Image (spheres, helix red, strand yellow):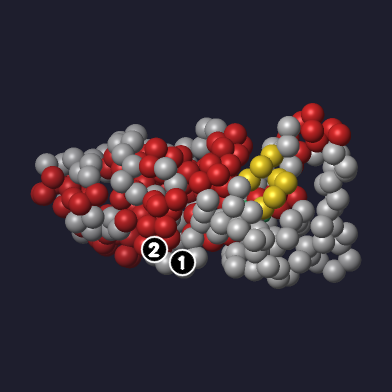
Amino acid sequence: MPRGQIPRQPSKAGRHEKFGKAIRLGSKLKTSTPAKLAKAPKARPEKKSAGGVAPKGYNPISPERVKEILKRLSETYPDAKCALHHNNAWELLVATILSAQCTDVRVNMVTPGLFKKYPTAKHFAALKPEELEPDIRSTGFFRNKSKSIVGAAQAVVNEFGGEVPDDMERLLTVPGAARKTANVVLGSWFGKAEGVVVDTHVHRISRRLELTKNDDPKSIEQDLMKVIPREKWIDFAHQIIHHGRALCVARNPKCVDCPLENICHAADKTWSTVDIHKAAQP
Ligand code: SF4
């Protein structure tokens, strides 16, 4: 909190209350009904603490807590979808490769012209990587991305008959398609939940929410696959990515507006009504 800035207080009828007041942050999340809340004493903000001890029995990955997180995310971001514009699996694969270290907005500015110039994987497969570089230069890392896209196009054309494969095993053989890219294509185009997309937002927020203690995408994905029901894998990633852009940003997350605030113990919260769990890391 910047010096001199007074922490905001939770309002009597503020957004946190609509989700119910967390009574206990232990293994079971219990919520008050609105009627109970009306009679309950006014919620008083607790001072943000830098450390803190986990409440006895606190289990951040208890099914009750995970269910509550998923419920609130679905209520807040009911229509969260992949932000990369695409019309088919190939376009999504290319857009996802381009999105590495680049904003989706920038990628969406580049892809319409790109796909007009090279409409199919076959057109890309006929290129030398250097020929593609000027078209994608503005997305950054354009030399590597050109090699990946042309390599991917050649694999799709030569190995898979021009169609992007729809299973993880074969997709991972396509140049430029590591697990994150494969999960994006499988989830957003084919509707197949074979894993959880772990991008920078999912990485950061899964740790803040203590859904994982790991710090590498592969292990984080494995942890998320264990605690989140499979039917939620695709939506969870979309919703967390939206949450990471809207509120749970990397620096100075907007905790005061966050629907997860009273069940979040992240060490770098900017505003808190609960004790900070010292194990929770950004
Ligand atoms: S309370 Fe803050 S740190 Fe926790 S999820 Fe919300 S925005 Fe992120």
Q: Specify whether tag 1 is near ligand 1 (CB below 8 Å).
A: no
Q: First in sequence, mark 1 or 2: give its number.
A: 1
Q: In the rendered image of this protein, does residue 83 appear above or below residue 154?
A: above
Q: Residue at x 56, y 56 (%)?
A: 60
* Camera-nearest residue between 204 and 94: 204
- Type of the residue with mark 1: Asn
Percent x, y of residue 127: 20, 54
* Camera-nearest residue between 101 and 280: 280
Using a 10 Å C-alpha cutoff, classify the residue at mark 1 as few (fewer than 14 neighbours), some (14 to 19) or many (20 or more).
some
The residue that mark 1 highlights is 214
**The residue tagged with tag 2: helix, strand or loop?**
helix
- Type of the residue with mark 2: Ser
Task: Using the rendered image of the protein, determine whether residue 204 is visible from the camera's viewpoint.
Answer: no
Q: Splitting the image into 4 quarters, where does residue 84 fall?
A: top left
The residue that mark 2 highlights is 219
Picture quarter with the N terminus? bottom right
Q: Quadrant of ligand 1?
A: bottom right
Q: Residue at x 39, y 38 (%)?
A: 231
Mark 1 in CB contact with mark 2 (< 8 angstroms) = yes
Among all residues in the image, which is located at the extreme top?
A: 35
Q: Residue at x 43, y 40 (%)?
A: 232
